[in-house]
């Protein structure tokens, strides 16, 4: 019998597997790769980065895990935020201005602004 079964090979599952590395553990992953939503896709001269693989560094739990597992991390040059919609690519200016600069319906624009205000309020809290 296993000591633990971990469901999901995303960052949380991989972190749990590392913490339990001295146990008899099985990690179950339904996808064709581990990493969960963490991935990068090449789009011409740009990369789309999905998931939480960008982190604040310094004295964070993520940095501790990276150090402990001897995983290599590197700085990502250029803009860490951009949006592409209907063929228009925005890579400059404040992220908060994106809802006003990309083509979308008024309803979608209002929804995006509302979500942005909620995230900003949570960050301030």
Image: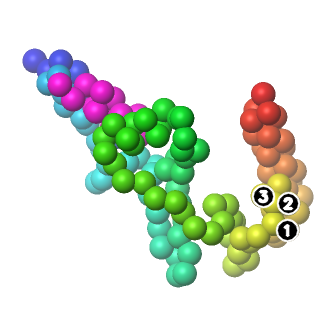
As measured in the structure, the alpha-carbon distance from the residue carrying label 1 to the one carrying label 3 is 10 Å
Quadrant of the rendered structure where residue 77 is?
A: bottom right
Front-most of 69 and 2?
Answer: 69
> Residue 68 placed where, x, y %?
33, 37
Q: What stretch is highlighted in magenta?
A: 10-22
Residue lying at the far front in this picture: please name it. Answer: 58
Disc number at residue 95? 3
Query: Which quarter of the image is occupied by the C terminus?
Result: top right
Query: Which quarter of the image is occupied by the N terminus?
Result: top left
Q: Do the residues labelled 2 and 3 touch (CB within 8 Å)?
A: yes
As measured in the structure, the alpha-carbon distance from the residue carrying label 2 to the one carrying label 3 is 5 Å
Residue at image coords 79%, 40%: 120
Residue lying at the far left in this picture: please name it. Answer: 1
> Residue 52 placed where, x, y %?
52, 47
Dot 2 lies on which element? helix
Quadrant of the rendered structure where residue 105 is?
A: bottom right
Q: Residues within 10 Å of mark 2 (few under 14, many from 20)?
A: few
Dot 3 lies on which element? helix
Q: How crowded is mark 1: few (under 14 residues within 10 Å), some or many (20 or more)?
A: few
The answer to whether residue 99 is seen in the rendering is no
Whether the magenta-drawn stretch holds residue 12 is answered as: yes
Is residue 36 positioned above or below 47 on the image?
above
Disc number at residue 97? 2
State the predominant SS element of the stretch in magenta: helix
Q: Give the number of the mark in front: 1 or 3.
A: 3
Q: Are marks 1 and 2 in contact (CB under 8 Å)?
A: yes
Q: Is residue 103 left or right of residue 46?
A: right
Disc number at residue 101? 1
The answer to whether residue 84 is seen in the rendering is yes
């Amino acid at each position: 019998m296993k000591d633990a079964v971990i469901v999901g090979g995303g960052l949380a599952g991989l972190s749990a597997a590392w913490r339990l590395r001295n146990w008899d553990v099985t990690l179950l992953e339904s996808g064709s790769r581990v990493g969960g939503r963490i991935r990068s896709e090449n789009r011409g001269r740009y990369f789309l980065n999905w998931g939480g693989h960008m982190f604040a560094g310094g004295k964070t739990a993520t940095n501790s895990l990276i150090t402990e597992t001897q995983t290599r991390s590197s700085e990502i040059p250029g803009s860490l935020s951009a949006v592409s919609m209907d063929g228009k690519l925005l890579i400059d200016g404040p992220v908060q201005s994106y809802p006003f600069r990309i083509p979308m319906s008024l309803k979608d624009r209002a929804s995006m602004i509302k979500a942005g205000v909620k995230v900003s309020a949570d960050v301030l809290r």
